[in-house]
Amino acid sequence: EGTSEYQSWRKQILAIGKCENCSSSENLQTHHKTPLRIFIKKYNGDVQKLKTCKELFDIKLGVALCIKCHRIEDNKLCKIYPQKNLQT
């Protein structure tokens, strides 16, 4: 689900057809290079503003990752952007 902008972004990212990190073509997921929680904080959780955020759907700020690599990237980002530092 999600907005048509999200669906379009997701479709374009997944069309790459392989994981950016390991080149696997199985179980691909989309990943924002800038964590989604950064955008949520930026817009104080305002969903309507998030839906119109152009950065959020910028193809250059997204990558296709397999499940394994996605977990690794998310863990790295959690260390860089700890949840406690992002509370509004």
Image (cartoon, rainbow, N blue to C red):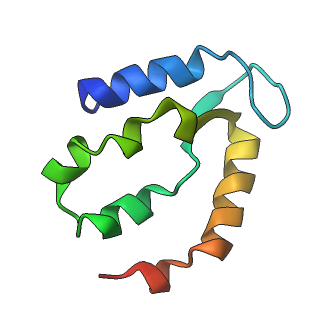
Q: Is residue 73 above or below residue 38?
A: above
The residue lying at 75 percent from left, 43 percent from top is: 68
In this view, the residue in front, 42 or 28, is 42
The residue lying at 25 percent from left, 50 percent from top is: 50
The residue lying at 47 percent from left, 85 percent from top is: 85
Query: Taking 72 as reference, is 14 left or right?
Result: left
Q: Is residue 54 above or below residue 12?
A: below
Picture quadrant of residue 30: top right
Query: Taking 40 as reference, is 35 left or right?
Result: right
Picture quadrant of residue 55: top left
Q: List x then y, in percent, for residue 69.
A: 75, 44
Q: List x then y, in percent, for residue 38.
A: 43, 64
Q: Is residue 5 above or below residue 49?
A: above
- In the rendered image, the residue lying farthest to the bottom is 84
Q: List x then y, in percent, for residue 58.
A: 44, 35
Picture quadrant of residue 6: top left
> Which quarter of the rendering shows the N terminus?
top left
The residue lying at 42 percent from left, 63 percent from top is: 37
Q: Is residue 33 above or below residue 60?
A: below
Query: Taking 5 as reference, is 35 left or right?
Result: right
Q: List x then y, in percent, for residue 62.
A: 55, 37
> Which quarter of the rendering shows the C terminus?
bottom left
How many numbered circles does the render carry? 0
In this view, the residue in front, 49 or 84, is 49
